[in-house]
Image: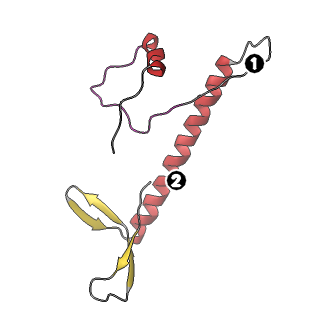
Amino acid sequence: MAPHHVYGTAAKDKDQQAAVVPYRDRDHTAWMAEHQIERAYRERFTRTQHAQDETDRLLTHALDNSLVDQAEPSAWFVAVARPEWPLPRTAPPLAREKAPDLCATPAPAHST
């Protein structure tokens, strides 16, 4: 959820409070200018909106295809998952017949 603000005291004057927004360029940390902060927030909100739109689309698809021909009232639990990070390009494509295995197999622990 970048950008991240860092608050602290200025190096030369400990009474002066400062807020900066760092970003990484390989192994170097630099500070964002105002226009970069504005762009970073705009990109953040755009990513969030796209993710919500895609989740809504997937949920609608699941509901339209799962609950169409219900003769009797029933209860359903519908879950929609959308990965935030794409699979590596070297990952093999998932075959449709293997998809149910994903629900039955626990995911490995992921550290960030």
Q: Quadrant of residue 19?
A: bottom left
Location of the C terminus (image quadrant): top left
| Amino acid type of the residue that numbered disc 1 sits on in the rendered structure | Ser
Disc 2 crowd rating (10 Å Cα; few below 14, some 14-19, many 20+) is few
Q: Earlier in the sequence, mark 2 or mark 1?
A: 2
Residue 103 in the image, given as x and y percentages of width and height? 48, 21
- Relative to 21, is 67 on the left or the right? right
Q: Quadrant of residue 73?
A: top right
The disc at residue 74 is 1
| Amino acid type of the residue that numbered disc 2 sits on in the rendered structure | Phe
Residue at 47 percent across and 53 percent down: it is 44
Q: Is residue 88 magenta?
A: yes
Q: Is residue 82 magenta?
A: yes
Q: Main secondary structure of the magenta part?
A: loop
Q: Nearer the viewer, mark 2 or mark 1?
A: 1
Q: Which residue is mark 2?
A: 45
Mark 2 falls on what kind of element? helix
Write down the region rendered in magenta.
81-95
Relative to 17, say whether 56 is above or below. above
Residue at 58 percent across and 29 percent down: it is 79
Q: CA distance from mark 2 to mark 1?
A: 37 Å
- Total marks in image: 2
Q: Are marks 2 and 1 in contact (CB under 8 Å)?
A: no
Please name whichever residue, 93 or 76, is drawn nearer the observer in this view of the structure: 76
